[in-house]
Image: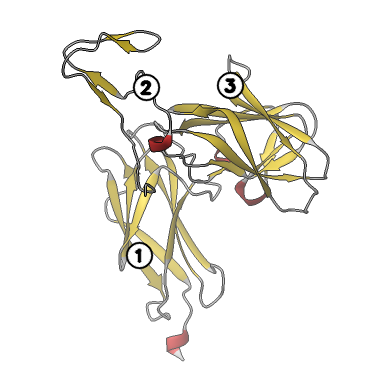
Amino acid sequence: DLTDLPVRRIELIPRSGCTIDPEHPALTFDVRVYPENAVKQPIAFRLTNASGIDSPCALLEAGEDSVTVTGKYDGEVWLRASCNNGCSHPRILSQLRLTVEGMGASVLDPYGFVAGGLCDRSHGELGAGNEHGITFSRDGVSMAGFSNVDFGLAGSDEITLPIFALNGDPYVMEMWLGDPLAGGEKLTDLPYCKPCIWNRYQPETYKLPRRLTGMQQLWFVMRQKVHLGGFHFTRQSRAWQQLTALGADALYGDSFEKTQDGVTGIGNNVSFEYGEMDFEDCE
């Protein structure tokens, strides 16, 4: 029965090249399946890095017979198209390598899940972990760094780490701001001790000694072997924080004086502006 023919190939056809830049911020690709009379079924699309981890460098929008990719940050991106052919997992996969350039350095969103495999700096020996995570060295010190983690104005002081340890022994992971070997600041120790469930990450949530805001470079340091799946931070509303006068995003008016302790000598028409104020949960 020709109507039951499975898809044998998916082709991604660029309309205008495979390089995204400020002059060509979005590219469209036509999508064709072969044989042409194969059974109709959904085609799933992803943007990943070379390791198959979802990439923050671009966005995609799927159409009926095409897909459009819009660049966000510089980097190499793989456009992947797949279909299941009646199975519960992809059976046919096609991919095309794209380059994004001239758009600026990549930024990581700590409020979504950041896979350990997105680590872009390291010292010592790191390995590939389960489910796109990383492993620290069994012997000696190993360090994993993540650049350009953008916490925004509100920031967060709560982090969750999915960890797989090889046994139920106690472990301590150090968390640093900046490179530990180049003037970084040790923020805290993150203890971990749970009975081992083989090949399964177990999440642990930690309260940090202070709220992290703005752009940060995060490092994790270990002296024992564990798998780190990645990290994510709890999104916290700036609307419910105690905000200082010096913490205003903008300050202007006829007359005022800013000191290290506050704002004094406030005259007429002085305005303090605070952005990212989400009152959605206010009753």
Q: Is residue 57 left or right of residue 66?
A: right
Whether residues under marks 1 and 2 lie with C-beta atoms below 8 angstroms apart, the answer is no
Q: Residue furthest bottom?
A: 1
186 to 190, vertically: above or below: above
Residue 73 position within the rendered picture, expressed as x and y whole percent measured from the top left: 38, 38
Q: Find residue 31 and name its label.
A: 1
Q: Amino acid at mark 1?
A: Val
- Can you identify the residue that label 3 sits on? 179
Sequence-wise first label, 1 or 3: 1
Q: CA distance from mark 1 to mark 3?
A: 44 Å
Q: Residue furthest front?
A: 283
SS category of the residue bearing label 3: loop
SS category of the residue bearing label 1: strand
Nearer to us in this view, 195 or 28:
195
- Can you identify the residue that label 2 sits on? 247
Q: Amino acid at mark 3?
A: Asp
